[in-house]
Image (tube, rainbow, N blue to C red):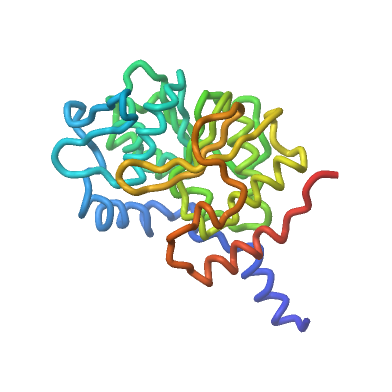
Amino acid sequence: MNILNRLFYKKRKFYDDDFDWESYTADSYQRRLTGDVEKDHDAIAKSAELSFDPATGHVTKQGRSLHPNQHLIYEVIGQLQPASVHEVGCGAGDHLGNATALFPEIQFSGSDRGATQLDLARNRHPDLTDRLKLQDLTMPFSRHWPKSDLIYSQAVLMHIHTAVSHFVALCNMVNMANEYVLLMENYQCHNFVQDIIGLRDGGHLAWDETHIYRFDGSTGARAILLSRTPLDYEELSSDAQIRAGLDPSRRRLDRAAEDSARAIFGY
């Protein structure tokens, strides 16, 4: 491989997260929030507009709909009833703000690696100010990070592709979680199920047992749910199960295969 190819190889293979996180809020996130999500859905719901039915396990939203991903997150929280919930990569804080109003008995907190993201969240949800902290999930685990019953991500790990950083982030999420980890991601961007199985069987996860499930929301979204104990959901053993029915993206799938190939599990 010549010098020019080596330079392009390094840039493509190891320095290619989807965004420059220092400028992410201004360059992309805020524009997508207002131009895409808020164009078709309510990102922030009034407390009286949301309700959870324990009998069905479904969340109901009056008025304009929530994004299906948001809707699913609240249904997971409602069905599992954790005492505490932490969102990694909390962005504008809308998921936390709505969830706090819907489940006032649960302790919520959030973190993001971008200070500008947290500034945006505090502006949109001043009542969350003391619950939001700076955290880089791809750093080695810190004993100062919060522990919660449920740790979740929404469109976070799907954008991380530098070296083995998404493996580190997955391990950190499990390390932070007392009981559950929820991944609401684009499931073609990584081989999530394959990678989690590799981490589990290689001894990288802190839990003694890690069960992998598919969770389907009532408005069409799907998610990967990890649990320390058995649950009554569809168990996942392959990425084909979580990708069933999705239009395949060859570019994303090829990149996912490259990312998975970097891992060396166990000892």
Rendered-image quadrant of the C terminus: top right
| Residue at 40 percent of width and 38 percent of height | 118
| Residue at 58 percent of width and 41 percent of height | 137
Residue that lies at the very extreme toward the left in this rendered image:
63
- 79 left or right, relative to 236: left
Residue that lies at the very extreme toward the top in this rendered image:
105
Residue that lies at the very extreme toward the right in this rendered image:
267
In this view of the protein, which residue sits in the foreground, 102 or 233? Answer: 233
- Residue 14 appears in the picture as rendered: yes
* In the depicted structure, whether residue 155 falls above or below residue 149: below
| Residue at 53 percent of width and 72 percent of height | 250
- Which image quadrant is residue 210 in? top right
Q: Position of residue 46 (x, y in %)?
A: 19, 31
In this view of the protein, which residue sits in the foreground, 196 or 124? Answer: 196
- Residue 113 appears in the picture as rendered: no
In this view of the protein, which residue sits in the foreground, 177 or 245? Answer: 245
Q: Position of residue 40 (x, y in %)?
A: 21, 53
